[in-house]
Every structure is written in structure tokens, then in C-alpha cells.
Amino acid sequence: MSTLATKRLGTNVGAEVLGVEVDQLLADDALPAACMEALEEHGALVFRELHIDDETQIAFSKKLDDVGKPEPAEPPKIYLVTLDPKKNPSAEYLKGTFAWHLDGAQDDVPTKATMLSAHAIAAIGGDTEFASTYAAFDDLTDEAKERLGRLRILHTFEASQRLVNPDPSPEELARWHEKPDKEHPLVWRHRSGRRSLVIGASASHVVGMDMDEGRALLDDLLVRATAQDRVYRHEWTVGDMVIWDNTGVLHRACPYDPNSSREMHRTTMSGDEPIQ
Ligand SMILES: [Fe+2]
């Protein structure tokens, strides 16, 4: 297989992968590169009702991770996405994922891609939404591209947590500050030549700009990037697997009951490109 058969799902982001069976994931040597190519084009790929087990998810994620890298990647670990603190001790922080974000925005090199497989879904809510920050950049005027290309943004854990916990205790604040802040350019110039916006929940403020003015700018960019007609919203069925390009796509979970049994198994493909 050299190219994937896909069906577009959203205007700017999202495509369903057609005709790939679970047995193919590890047996078809051409599939990983074809997937990464389709991911670059569509931003998010949906494989419906594959019902992969953890072992297959880890092995397939590693194959995707190895595409185009000089050294083989470490096999990823399964991370449980659930609001049940008995299954995930950081469940409380996961409420931060109800806001638009990219994974690892405070890292030097954010993850390249993220994979989720649905093991249990919420009765109400719990969809996952995706929005392209490549498209958000492309939509800007030439003047705005030029102006925004000179700005830098400070990303903090506090900024994303304040969206769900606006009145933290001193202890909570101290815990949030354990994770170091990170400054990135607002516009990411990718090796591919494409450009995307690095925005979302972790974006605290524009460096060197009046606070309110900077906040207004960041809020405006986020609202435009995530306008309903620009978003692909995935309504999960148990067994679905979705992969997205974490470098050019924002995502968020739609709120759901914390007592819900919703359980996603997440793996990540390591990044090899700093935001620059
Ligand atoms: Fe996330």
C-alpha cells in the first residue's frame, strides 16, 4: 500500500481511513509511512471500530514514530485518559484538556502525534474536537502573518489550569509552578515549509506586550482558529482509534460526567522538531 484511501471529514482537518483492518497495522510495512503522509495532509485520522489491544497500539505507535527518524524510537507507554482518580492519579489535571491545547506545549520539542483508542465512552459528552493551526495561519492577511511572526508567547501550566480552577489554593499554585514555563514563537516555521500558530490553553501572554492587549490577541486567534465550521468533532464509538498531528492541530475533549466510565488509551509519537 503506498497511499491510504481516505474520506474527508472536516473542512480543514480530519479524514476517515478506509479499508484498513486491524491485522494490517503490524503486517503491512508500507502502512506507517502512508499514515504519516496522510496525517500531514489531514491533521487527524479516524480508524473506526478497530478495537486494538494495548500491545498492538504500542507496536503500531512505535512503527509510526520510527517513520523518517534516523534512530528507532523507544516504544511508547499506554497512558490512561480517565477522570477516575483510582485509575489515573493525575485525573484532576485532565479537566484542563476540556480547553483547546496541544500536548507538551511547555516542552522543548512537543510530541509529533498522539493516538487515542476508545475502550469505554461517556453516555453524554466526551467527544474530541480538532482544529488546524496550519489553516489558522494560512487564513491570516499577509500583514498579520508578518506582524505575528515577530511575537513570542510564554506557555505555562498555570494558564491552562486556571481555565478549570480559577481560584487555586497556595498549595495548588505551588504545584502548578513546579512545571517550568516555556517561551515559544507564536508562529512555528516547520521544516516542511508550512507554518502554524502555537496557541491554546497553555499560552499565558505575549512577551513584551501589554497584558490585556496580548490576551485579547491570543483570545481572538483562538476563537478564529476554532470557529465551529473549522472544527472536526469526533463522536466516539468503542473501538475507534484516532491519531492527530500534535504539531499543527489543537484538540480538546468535550466535558463529560467525572463519574463516567469513559476510558481512552493514549500513546504518543515523539517529536523531532523544536518549535522555531
Ligand atoms: Fe491533550
Image: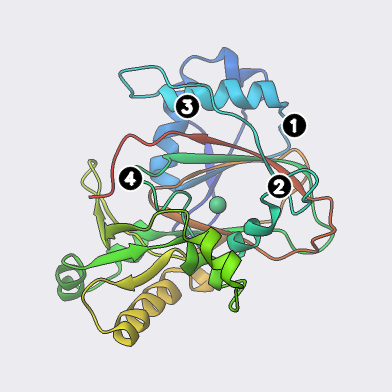
Q: Which mark is residue 51?
A: 1
Tell me the element at label 4: loop
Mark 3 or 2, closer to the camera: 2
Decide which of tag 4 and tag 3 comes sooner along the chain.
Answer: 3
Decide which of tag 2 and tag 4 comes sooner along the chain.
Answer: 2
Q: Is residue 90 depicted above or below 208 in this figure?
A: above
Q: Give the residue type that dot 1 points to.
A: His
Task: State the image coordinates of residue 219 (x, y, percent, origin top left).
Answer: 41, 78
Which image quadrant for residue 78? top right
Tell me the residue that label 2 is attached to. 89
Between the residue at mark 3 and the residue at mark 2, the CA separation in whole angstroms equals 28 Å
Give the camera-side residue of 252 and 51.
252
Between the residue at mark 2 and the residue at mark 4, the CA separation in whole angstroms equals 25 Å
Between the residue at mark 4 and the residue at mark 1, the CA separation in whole angstroms equals 33 Å
Q: Residues within 10 Å of mark 2 (few under 14, many from 20)?
A: few
Tell me the element at label 3: helix
Residue 238 as seen in the image, left or right of residue 90? right
